[in-house]
């Protein structure tokens, strides 16, 4: 998967810098073209001569070449790259990346880089555990960077696996998996519904719910990252979409979402129904703002269409349908009966009982239940990460024709 890929390898001043030479050799062996960028401190740990002879390219570390005055364009480098890996990444470089302190070629290149960025931290365990480092790593995650943390290895048992740089083989495996994933939905069209719906009562009031749309938007992004064309039918949310493969259709009510989703599903290979659709809407919508009166008021509600069930009904051979279930009790059996009733291929269960799961937060903890096999538990992590796991499962089913 790495053959012909353009990779920037950023090396900083950590004792683990010697491992970067091995990482570079592995990347070159896989057929990647690698440009090394070093911080001044990085050069104290490993000589650029070793690295340039391995990569076959002069190492870049200053903005200008001292003797010729040639300018190194971080912008061109950022555009050239298919990926940037910073390994090892020190606490200092992580802090600079998190806060945009571009006082060296490496951080400047990072800021110009349009490609995905992978960061392999390496530092003493106390530094690693410091709230400042944790916070900066969280910031990098929130920018969409991939943090590669060691999970296993010789020091794992007493260092809880953190603090030391991930082994080069594993970093290469993460990259390989990333590029493989980029093609897992190539040529496919996926419909995603996201966010709440608003059901109008009068010109200024509505019935809504707490859905933020974050999970659905993360799913749309993950599908697009996997190479799919995405139609994102979004209820009223304050989120932005940036990926060029996402066509976004903004709707407000369940009825509007129904029309947009039914039309899009006709041309889609799969649909992920992540929206929190209102089950009922006011029977009549007042043209004028309802006035306060001393009296009790009754709001009559009519049922909304079940969009997922309708798509399940229309599903053709080879089309896939994924639903979500938010349950407060008898979770698994309720989710399974929903899957059957709506003719879903699998259902993603989140429980309101779990801390860090559900509405409005950035994390989620879900169980994916398929028609066959054991449920897959996805532990509590960022919604963006949960989305990648869900899309992986969907892509695997679609590619295996299950
Ligand atoms: O039946 P329940 O609302 O719990 O089912 C949840 C699943 O069905 C979610 O995937 C949700 O997006 C979808 N749904 C829908 N249209 C509705 C209600 C739910 O698409 N009117």
Image (tube, helix red, strand yellow):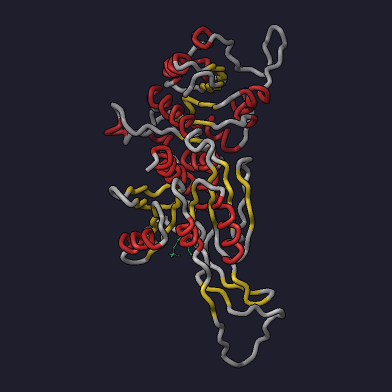
Image-quadrant location for residue 129: top left
Asked if one can make out residue 71 in the rendered structure from this viewpoint, the answer is yes
Q: Nearer the viewer, residue 316 or 13?
A: 316
Query: Could you tell me which residue is drawn at 68 percent across and 25 percent down?
Result: 75
Residue 271 spot, x, y in % from top left: 50, 51
Q: Nearer the viewer, residue 217 or 39?
A: 217
The quadrant of the rendering that contains the C terminus is top left
Image side of residue 70 versus residue 161, left or right? right
Q: Is residue 40 above or below residue 114?
A: above
Q: Is residue 299 above or below residue 82?
A: below
Residue 279 spot, x, y in % from top left: 50, 70
Asked if one can make out residue 18 in the rendered structure from this viewpoint, the answer is no
Image side of residue 175 versus residue 73, left or right? left
Image-quadrant location for residue 254: bottom right
Count of numbered tags: 0
Q: Nearer the viewer, residue 98 or 261?
A: 261
Q: Is residue 113 above or below residue 386?
A: above
Residue 272 spot, x, y in % from top left: 48, 52
Q: Is residue 276 above or below residue 231?
A: below
Image side of residue 247 versus residue 192, left or right? right
Query: Could you tell me which residue is drawn at 36 percent across and 60 percent down?
Result: 340
Query: Could you tell me which residue is drawn at 57 percent across and 33 percent down?
Result: 97
Identify the residue at the far bottom of this view.
295
């Amino acid at each position: 998967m790495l053959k012909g890929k353009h990779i920037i390898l950023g090396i900083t001043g950590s004792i683990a810098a010697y491992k970067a030479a091995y990482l570079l050799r592995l990347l070159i062996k896989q057929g990647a073209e690698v440009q090394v960028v070093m911080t001044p401190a990085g050069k104290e740990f490993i000589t650029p001569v070793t690295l340039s002879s391995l990569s076959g390219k002069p190492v870049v570390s200053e903005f200008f070449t001292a003797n010729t005055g040639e300018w190194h364009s971080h912008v061109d480098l950022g555009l050239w790259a298919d990926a940037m890996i910073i390994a090892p990444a020190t606490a200092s470089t992580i802090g600079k990346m998190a806060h945009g302190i571009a006082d060296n070629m490496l951080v400047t290149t990072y800021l110009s880089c349009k490609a995905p960025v992978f960061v392999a931290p390496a530092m003493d365990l106390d530094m690693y555990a410091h709230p400042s480092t944790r916070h900066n790593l969280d910031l990098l995650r929130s920018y969409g960077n991939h943090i590669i943390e060691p999970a296993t290895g010789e020091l794992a048992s007493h260092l809880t696996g953190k603090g030391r740089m991930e082994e080069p083989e594993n970093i290469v495996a993460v990259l390989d998996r990333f590029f493989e994933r980029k093609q897992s939905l190539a040529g496919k069209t996926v419909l995603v519904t996201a966010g709440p719906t608003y059901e109008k009562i009068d010109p200024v009031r509505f019935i809504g719910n707490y859905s933020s749309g974050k999970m659905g938007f993360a799913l749309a992004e993950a599908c697009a990252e996997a190479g799919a064309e995405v139609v994102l039918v979004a209820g009223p949310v304050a989120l932005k979409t940036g990926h060029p493969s996402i066509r976004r259709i903004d709707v407000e009510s369940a009825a509007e979402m129904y029309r947009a989703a039914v039309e899009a599903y006709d041309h889609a290979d799969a649909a992920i129904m992540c929206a929190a659709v209102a089950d009922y809407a006011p029977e009549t919508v007042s043209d004028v703002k309802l006035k306060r009166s001393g009296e009790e008021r009754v709001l009559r509600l009519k049922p909304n269409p079940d969009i997922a069930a309708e798509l399940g009904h229309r599903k053709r051979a080879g089309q896939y349908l994924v639903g979500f279930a938010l349950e407060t009790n008898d979770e698994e059996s309720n989710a399974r009966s929903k899957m059957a009733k709506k003719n879903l291929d699998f259902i993603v269960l989140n429980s309101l009982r779990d801390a860090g799961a559900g509405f409005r937060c950035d994390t989620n903890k879900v169980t994916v239940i398929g028609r066959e096999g054991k449920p897959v538990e996805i532990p509590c992590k960022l919604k963006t990460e949960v989305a990648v796991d869900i899309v992986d499962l969907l892509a695997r089913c679609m590619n295996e024709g299950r």
